Image (cartoon, rainbow, N blue to C red):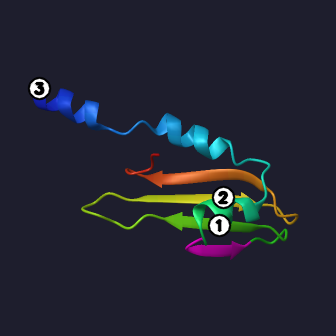
Amino acid sequence: MVLLALFVAGCPSFERYEHRLDGWRGRGAHQLVSVWGSPDAVMALKDGGRVFEYKTPVVVGMFCETRFTVDRKGFIQKWWYHGNDCRL
């Protein structure tokens, strides 16, 4: 029982990370790159937009992959993330 409580208490709060990502909606991709650095990958979309992908290095099973969808005018429209180490 104590072990379970320690495990739950040690889990990162993803709410803060999601709040941080929400703050990027409507901002320019150039601003994102100036803060987050160059993306690990950039994928072109059929509508002229792009997806910027950022990945954290995998360390003992911990990882985070975050993607930002940028419209053809260069503004961030949405985000997506996956992983167990996505936090501030």
Q: Magenta region: which residues?
A: 39-44
Instruction: Give me the residue at 27% from left, 30% from top.
Output: 9
**Magenta segment: does it hold 42?**
yes
- Answer left or right for 46 relative to 2: right
Label disc, if present, on residue 8 of the rendered structure: none
Asked which quadrant contains residue 31, the reply is bottom right
| Amino acid type for the residue under numbered disc 1 | Phe
Instruction: Give me the residue at 37% from left, 50% from top.
Output: 84
What kind of element bears circle 2? strand
Residue 14 locus on image (x, y percent):
46, 39
Residue 42 locus on image (x, y percent):
65, 74
The total of numbered circles placed on residues is 3
What kind of element bears circle 1? strand
For the N terminus, which image quadrant?
Answer: top left
Task: Look at the picture and state if 32 lies above or below 21.
Answer: below
Marks 1 and 2: CB-CB under 8 Å? yes
Q: Which residue is mark 2?
A: 68
**First-in-chain label (2 vs 3):** 3
| Amino acid type for the residue under numbered disc 2 | Phe
Between the C-alphas of marks 1 and 2, the distance is 5 Å
The residue lying furthest to the left in this view is 2
Q: Which residue is mark 3?
A: 2
Marks 2 and 3: CB-CB under 8 Å? no
| Amino acid type for the residue under numbered disc 3 | Val
Asked which quadrant contains residue 35, the reply is bottom right
